Amino acid sequence: MAFLKVIPLEEALKVVLSFELPVKVEEVDLANALGRIVAEDVYSPTDVPPFDRATVDGYAVRAEDTFMASEASPVKLKVVGEVHAGEVPSIELGKGETVYISTGAMLPKNADAVIQFEDVERVNDEIIIQKPAYPGLGVMKKGADIEKGKLLIKKGTKLTFKETALLSAVGIHKVRVFKRPRVAVISTGNEVVLPGQELKPGQIYDINGRAITDAVNELGGEGIFIGIAQDNRDSLKELIERAIEVGDLIILSGGASGGMRDLTASVIEELGEVKVHGIAIQPGKPTIIGIVKGKPIFGLPGYPTSCLTNFTLLIAPLLLKSLGREGKVKKVKAKLKHKVFSVKGRRQFLPVKLEGNIAVPILKGSGAVTSFIDADGFIEIPENVESLDEGEEVEVILFSF
């Protein structure tokens, strides 16, 4: 294997999307479905509302009984009862009759309109109407909101509180979702320590482990942080072997370049096969793509911005594909706030912050933590372009799943 044999991004992505992660489906209670990815189209098993109901407090009437009502010639209707929400009315309206009805209550038979109580005058057991009602006034018809059999949620949709509320509204209490692919995450480097530990001179806190694990979770997978491998073969090999046991996919960050202490590529080659080591992009050139015991393994750069950019470009599409989510990351159009320069012949991805429809370039460098934290996404500067002008329309690939 010739390490750092650089290939185009499209060729690397083709390798990635040739991998097949296990696709399994399970049924979960609606109470545990938030954030999960729907494994099949979901249709409404019922009408919403399931009956004609009042949308106001007032009087249910036969609209035709009110057609002649006017201020000069009001119509009187006899009140023959009351209907409240949750009740099944036993009353059948006859000619010239009405009932008091509460918001949300089922209309009695023959009623086709509800007049707000403020719009009538009640005297003893009669109401006086001075304006005609029309069929459907103050009424939500059966199925007017959601018809039985309507497609509610498409396969591949990530369930937010809106979708879970919708499922609840039609009485669905269990939903079939994709099993979350298990992604084992390893950080590397003698200088990297976990938050909560004492930071000694020369050390930094780990950001990639947390960021990658939670990015996986946000996508709909199950991120499992394995730990931090030291810069020696035994430590790295031990954690990779542990990750292979628990994960469907393995992600390492750091240790991907050609330095003496960067062992990731050689350990992956020892345990399996390195398929890619070097992609013609900046940042993230020394990214590794391999396979060990049939499981995809990635070695991402150590700088957070490079790491998360390449995660978005390469790993997110694979995870999305395995979850029925079309394998595409989110993109939006924006206009560049100011001119930016690049090195011609080098394909560059530049982090940007969105201010409305304006993309503000972040030029701190990929080694700065806040380059990633402040960014909403990144833009591409093609290899044959030396600069992008102020106001130029760009496509922003979002750090959002």
Image (cartoon, helix red, strand yellow):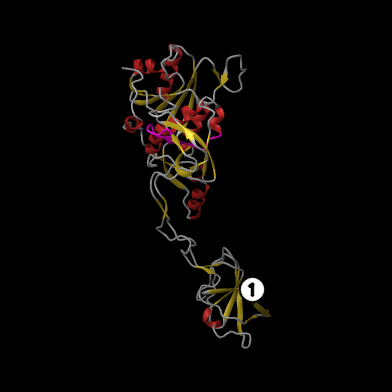
Task: Tell me the kind of residue under disc 1.
Answer: Phe
| Identity of the residue drawn at 61% across and 88% down | 73
State whether residue 62 is above or below residue 213: below
**Image quadrant occupied by the N terminus:** top left
Residue sitting at the far bottom = 73
In front of the other: 394 or 156: 394
> Majority secondary structure of the magenta segment?
loop
Q: Position of residue 14 (x, y in %)?
A: 32, 32
Q: Position of residue 57 (x, y in %)?
A: 62, 69
Residue 33 showing in the rendered view: no
In front of the other: 309 or 292: 309
Q: Position of residue 295 (x, y in %)?
A: 36, 26
State whether residue 162 is above or below residue 285: below
Left or right relative to 287: residue 59 = right
In front of the other: 277 or 106: 277
Disc 1 packing (10 Å; few <14; some 14–19; many ≥20): some
Left or right relative to 80: residue 12 = left
Label 1 secondary element: helix
State whether residue 83 is above or below residue 352: below
| Mark 1, residue position | 117
Name the quadrant containing residue 379: top left
- Magenta segment boundaries in residue numbering: 374-386
